[in-house]
Image (spheres, grey):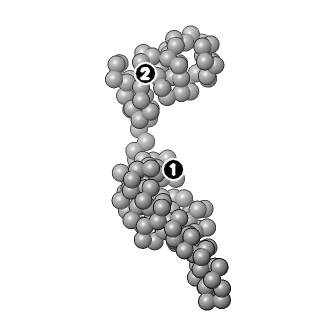
Amino acid sequence: MYCKNCGKELNENAEVCLQCGTLKGNGNRFCSNCGAPVSENQAVCLKCGCQIAPCIHKTTNGEQKSKITAGLLGIFLGAFGVHNFYLGYKNKAVIQVTVSAIGLLLSCCTGVTFIATVGIGIWGLIEGILILTGQIKTDADGNLLI
């Protein structure tokens, strides 16, 4: 067994790596089976074939979420948090829809609330672009977007 953080060989009974002090099983830079360096996104060690990390591509209910759908929802309906509801970020989505709704309702009285609504819209637009460019890669459960 090897340390997943520094790649040094570990004693079977060790709870921490004596080289780097990392708890046994923590880290993602080396294969725990052979000690070979691995990349962050690698699922299988290229040297020994051992599985590096569990597959996280599917959601718990078997439904995969689309990166394109989430991105387009963010671009066109981001001010209302629709993309965040879709991805499961419910708290952030509620904040976006609440601020936008209040801003739209009160925009007839003052220009300040309209500025808040535009700001939330820009926030949604930026998140939509980040989703489409791959900067935001996962939903609220940590599942990769397809």
- Residue at 58% of width from left, 62% of height from top? 92
Depicted 57 relative to depicted 94: above or below: above
Which structural element holds mark 2?
Answer: loop
Q: Residues within 10 Å of mark 1 (few under 14, many from 20)?
A: few
Depicted 21 relative to depicted 111: above or below: above
**Front position in the image: 54 or 134:** 134
Given this view, does label 2 or label 1 mark the residue nearer the observer? 2
**Does the rendering let one see residue 14?**
no
- Residue at 39% of width from left, 32% of height from top? 42
Which structural element holds mark 1?
Answer: loop
Residue 93: give x, y in percent of width and height.
56, 65
| Alpha carbon separation for disc pair 2 and 1 | 28 Å
Mark 2 sits on what residue? 37
Residue 54: give x, y in percent of width and height.
44, 35
102 relative position to 55: left or right: right
Report the number of numbered marks: 2
- Residue at 44% of width from left, 55% of height from top? 130
- Residue 51: image quadrant is top left
Depicted 92 relative to depicted 29: above or below: below
51 relative position to 139: left or right: left
**Does the rendering let one see residue 22?**
yes
What number is the disc on residue 141? 1
Q: Residues within 10 Å of mark 2 (few under 14, many from 20)?
A: some
